[in-house]
Amino acid sequence: MIDGMQRSLDRLSRVRGVSGSMFVAADDGLAVAQLLMEGVNGKVLAAFAASLARKVSGAAAATGAGKVKFIQMQSTGGILLVCAGGERLVTVVADAGVNVGLARLEMMRAVEALQA
């Protein structure tokens, strides 16, 4: 399983603009596997991604919007992408110029690999 995660992280790291990617335990926000550039705080990123996913999922449930599959948050410092994969979240941090569509495609592939 870890080898599959590492392959997925390697693929994500090849997307231009991605500065870090990781698999995060959805329930406790701990990093399971990560590939981060220097300067990216993995512990903070993992905890934030899990917290964000819980809050957005709760809001979606409360409004009847259904299950959240993908979250995109843009800020002045870049972009955070979170893709739900059951017990794991695939998380990417990237600069503003990242091709979000390509990053999302690789994230969905990573989720599929987790569930296979």
Image (spheres, rainbow, N blue to C red):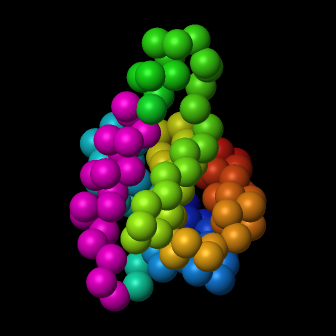
What x and y, as percent, mark residue 12? Answer: 62, 73
Residue most extreme to the bottom: 38
Q: What stretch is highlighted in magenta?
A: 38-55
From what the image shows, is residue 38 above or below residue 88? below
The structure residue drawn at horizontal position 68% and vertical position 58%, both measured from the top left corner, is 104
Residue 50 located within the stretch drawn in magenta: yes
What x and y, as percent, mark residue 85? Answer: 57, 43
The N terminus: image quadrant: bottom right
**Can the viewer see residue 7?**
no
What x and y, as percent, mark residue 89? Answer: 49, 49
Query: Is the magenta region chiefly helix, strand or loop?
Result: helix
Q: Quadrant of residue 100?
A: bottom right
What x and y, as percent, mark residue 113? Answer: 68, 55
Q: Is residue 41 left or right of residue 105?
A: left
3 or 66, nearer to the observer: 66
From what the image shows, is residue 3 above or below residue 87? below
Residue 104 located within the stretch drawn in magenta: no
**Can the viewer see residue 16?**
yes
